[in-house]
Image (tube, rainbow, N blue to C red):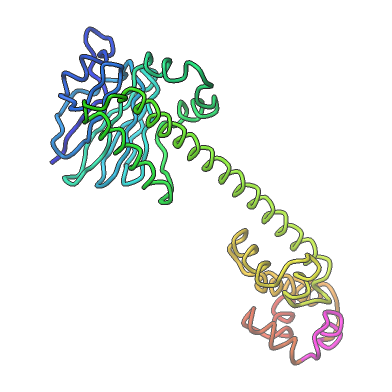
Amino acid sequence: MTVALTFAIVQNGMPMKFVDLISYYHIPYVSEKGIAIWKINSEIREEENIPGIDSHAILFVVGGSMEISVQGKIQSLTRGYFVDVLGDKQSVKLLSASPDIQAYFLLLTDEYLLELFKNRPPLPLSYAMDIMQNPVYMIENSFIVSIIKCLDDIEQTMANPLYHFQDSMLKCKISVLLLQMSEILLYKTQKEKRKSRESDRKRTLFAQFMKLLSEYVKEEHTVNFYASRLNVTPQYLRRVVKVCSGKNAYTWICEELVREIVNLLINTDKTMQAIADELHFSDQAVLTKFFRRIKGVSPLQYRNGIE
C-alpha cells in the first residue's frame, strides 16, 4: 500500500497551528505546554503535498522504510534516519511507507523551545545552520539505541498524567534528546573533517610517490624502496596508491619502467644489454622477459616494429 502524509496541513494558505494539527491527526500524547509525540505505523492517512508547520518537528525511523520529499528532493529513509524540520521554512512530505514502518514523530512549539532554553544557551548555531541546509541525516548504529531510549522516555512520561513533576521531567528528557542530536551531528561533522584530512594526506602521499617514481625508476624497481623514502610501510603505500589511482604501486613502477625502455628503444641505438644496465636489470634476459610480459613482444621486436 502506498500512503502519503504531510507534516502539516495548510488552511487558507497558512501552516496549520499546533493545536489543529494535534486534533487532525488524533495524536495520542500531547502536553498543553506545546509537546506532542506520535508513533507512526502503517495506518497513515493520505494527504495533499502541503509544506510547513508552526512547530519544530522531528521524525526518527525505528524500523521499516519510507520515502519523503524534502524541499522537492525525494529521499528514502530506513532505520536510523532523522528528519529535523525547523518551523515552516522547510517543505517536507512523507510520500510512502512500507507496511512494517515504525517511526517517532515529535512536535515542539516555538514557545515551548523558548521556555526550554530560557535560562541557558540554545542549541549550537552550527546545528541549526546544518539542519536548515539538510534536514535529513543518517546516524550511526552506536547512537540509534540512545535516541530510541530518549524518545521512549518522552512518550512514557507523557503517557502518565499522574507524574507530579511531569513538566520538569519532560524538559529534562527533551533537553537530553536535543543535546544528543547536536552531539551526533557534531560527531558526524568532525568525522567528515577527519576523513577529508585523511583523504588529503593520501593524495599528498600519492603525489610524492609519483614524484619519486619519476626520479628513481631507472634505479629502483621495488615498492619497499619508495615506502622507505616516504617513511611509510609498503602495505600502507600499496593501499594509498590503490585508493588514489585505482592501480597498485607495482603496476605504476612497471608502467614507468616500460616507458623508459620504449624511450631508449626508439630514441637510441643502445643494445639490449646496455639498456638493461642503464635501467638496473640484472641482465638482458631479465629485461626481455619483463618487457615481453607487459607489451606482448620482445624489446627487439618492438624496436623493429617501430622502425
> How many numbered marks, from 0 up?
0
Estimate the x, y position of residue 14 in percent, counting from the top left. Answer: 28, 10
* Magenta-drawn stretch, dominant element (helix, strand or loop): helix
Q: Residue at x 18, y 47 (%)?
A: 100
Q: Percent x, y for residue 288?
A: 72, 87
* Residue nearest the observer in this picture, 278 or 78: 78
Q: Residue furthest top?
A: 12
Q: For residue 66, what is the image quadrant? A: top left
**Magenta stretch: includes residue 273:** yes
In the displayed structure, 57 sits above or below 204; it is above
- Residue 201 among those drawn in magenta: no
> Where is residue 18, by image quadrant?
top left
x 70%, y 59%: residue: 206
Closer-to-camera residue (216/24): 24
Q: Specify the quadrant that holds the C terminus.
A: bottom right
Q: Residue at x 47, y 16 (%)?
A: 118
Between residues 90 and 108, which one lies in front from this camera angle?
108
Apparent side of residue 230 relative to residue 126 in the rendered image (left or right) = right
Residue drawn at 86 percent across, 80 percent down: 278
Q: Quadrant of the N terminus?
A: top left
30 over 271 or under it: above or below:
above
In the rendered view, does 124 fall on the left or right side of 202? left
**Relative horizontal placement of residue 223, taking residue 179 as reference (left or right):** right
Q: Quadrant of residue 116?
A: top left
Question: Percent x, y for residue 161?
Answer: 21, 26
Instruction: Where is residue 260? Give x, y as percent.
Output: 78, 72
Residue 124 or residue 44, whichever sits in front = 124
Q: Which residues are magenta?
A: 272-284
